[in-house]
Amino acid sequence: MSYSNYKQSVKENKREQISAGILVYRKNKKTNKVDVLLVHPGGPYWQNKDLGAWHIPKGGVNEREDYLITAVREFEEETGLNLTKNDIKKLKYLCRVRSKGGKIVHVYFLNKDFKKDKFGTSKEFIEIEWPPNSGVKKIYPENDKVEYIDLETAKKKIIPYQLPALLKLESLLTRQS
């Protein structure tokens, strides 16, 4: 392979992964604190992990797809919760965050208090070889928990690269009050 072909193939392999998601928050009437809705990844690797494991419901943007459309679809798939047309109209762009691996996540936000009995489970599943190198493949839900978590606790539980989204939301809400 020539050097120029090598450079081109490296560029193609490093194509940015782009995702979009929705950070839902509410003012907890009992504690008077802000809670955010996060999901916990499913599967055996994440089973006993809590701190640094939770994330904003999000998913990959299809080619030429609008970020907002992706965010709504993925939120509903990952949480089992449905957004109304009115909810979608209220969505606002918050920020974008980037993982160490280069994935960019565009984050929208919404103030909504979903009732706990409406929480579903992930509509998407992943297939994993477990235990590793065993040759045995098992299917797990992409996310195994959906919960409102108070903002201070969420800052510890969220996957580190998404922390700036929580801080941005906190800053916006502080300015509004």
Image (cartoon, rainbow, N blue to C red):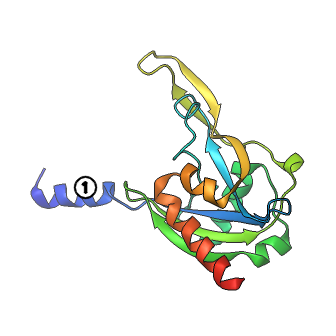
Viewer-closest of 177 and 47: 177
Q: Is residue 25 visible?
A: yes
Viewer-closest of 78 and 63: 78
Q: Residue at x 61, y 55 (%)?
A: 154
Looking at the picture, does residue 48 appear above or below residue 51? above
- Residue 32 left/right relative to 97: right
Looking at the picture, does residue 121 appear above or below residue 59? above
Query: Label 1 is placed on what type of residue?
Result: Ser
Q: To which residue does mark 1 refer?
A: 9
Viewer-closest of 3 and 107: 107
Q: Is residue 58 visible?
A: no
Query: Could you say whether the residue bearing mark 1 is in a helix, strand or loop?
Result: helix
State the image coordinates of residue 135 (x, y, percent, origin top left). Answer: 46, 16
Looking at the picture, does residue 36 appear above or below residue 49? below
The quadrant of the image that shows the C terminus is bottom right
State the image coordinates of residue 77 (x, y, percent, origin top left). Answer: 71, 51
Q: Which of the 4 quarters of the picture holds residue 90?
A: bottom right
State the image coordinates of residue 48 (x, y, percent, origin top left). Answer: 57, 31
- Residue 21 left/right relative to 121: left
